């Protein structure tokens, strides 16, 4: 089920500015896929692929990405996170890249939400007890 959940979370994130859903919803769905792995195979198995350090780095880098996208318009001489005014192409209405920088911002927020929920759940999850 994980690949389907993961792809669906990416789909929600990509089309978030066109249809209902968006960055928060996509991040939650992607985190749900990793939580499903943790519930199915255990915390140790899931931490082999994505431990606390990697998840916190992903979470931190996503906010750095968000700030960097916002600074592009500042460097162009406009307000933080300006879009069309700053010369960022907005594309054809209704397509994935029709929002200019909103696509990049949605991706950053989805990654941030994914990292936060994954870290919170991994703290809540109990350690396996050897019997």
Image: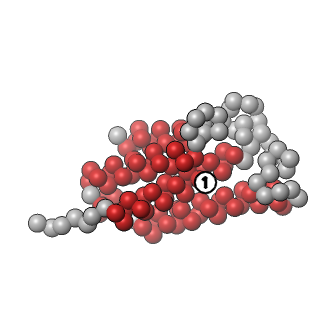
Rendered-image quadrant of the C terminus? bottom left
Which residue position is annotated with label 1? 108
Q: Is residue 3 visible?
A: yes
Above-or-below relation of 39 to 48? above
Residue 81 in the image, given as x and y percentages of width and height: 76, 54
- In the image, taking residue 56 as reference, residue 1 lies left or right, namely left
Residue at position x 44%, y 51% from top?
A: 31
- In the image, taking residue 29 as reference, residue 79 lies left or right, namely right
Residue at position x 26%, y 66% from top?
A: 127
Residue at position x 68%, y 32% from top?
A: 95
Residue 3 in the image, given as x and y percentages of width and height: 40, 42
Residue at the right extreme? 77
Residue 82 in the image, given as x and y percentages of width and height: 80, 51
Q: Work out whether residue 43 or residue 23 is closer to the camera in this orientation and state it.
A: 23
Rendered-image quadrant of the N terminus? top left
Q: Is residue 50 visible?
A: no
Residue at the bottom extreme? 53
- In the image, taking residue 49 as reference, residue 10 lies left or right, namely right
Residue 52 falls in image quadrant: bottom left
Residue at position x 45%, y 57% from top?
A: 117
Coloring scheme used: secondary structure
Mark 1 lies on a secondary structure that is helix
Residue 56 in the image, given as x and y percentages of width and height: 49, 66
Above-or-below relation of 119 to 109? below
Quick one: label 1, few (<14), some, or many (20+) residues within 10 Å?
many
């Amino acid at each position: 089920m994980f690949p389907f959940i993961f792809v669906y979370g990416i789909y929600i994130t990509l089309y978030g500015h066109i249809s209902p859903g968006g960055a928060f919803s996509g991040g939650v769905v992607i985190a749900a896929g990793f939580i499903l792995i943790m519930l199915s195979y255990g915390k140790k198995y899931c931490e082999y692929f994505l431990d606390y350090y990697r998840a916190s780095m992903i979470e931190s880098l996503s906010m750095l990405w968000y700030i960097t996208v916002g600074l592009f318009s500042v460097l162009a001489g406009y307000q933080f996170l300006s879009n069309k005014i700053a010369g960022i192409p907005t594309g054809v209405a209704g397509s994935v890249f029709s929002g200019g920088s909103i696509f990049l911002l949605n991706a950053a927020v989805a990654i941030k939400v994914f990292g936060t929920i994954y870290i919170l759940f991994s703290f809540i999850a109990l350690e396996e007890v050897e019997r």
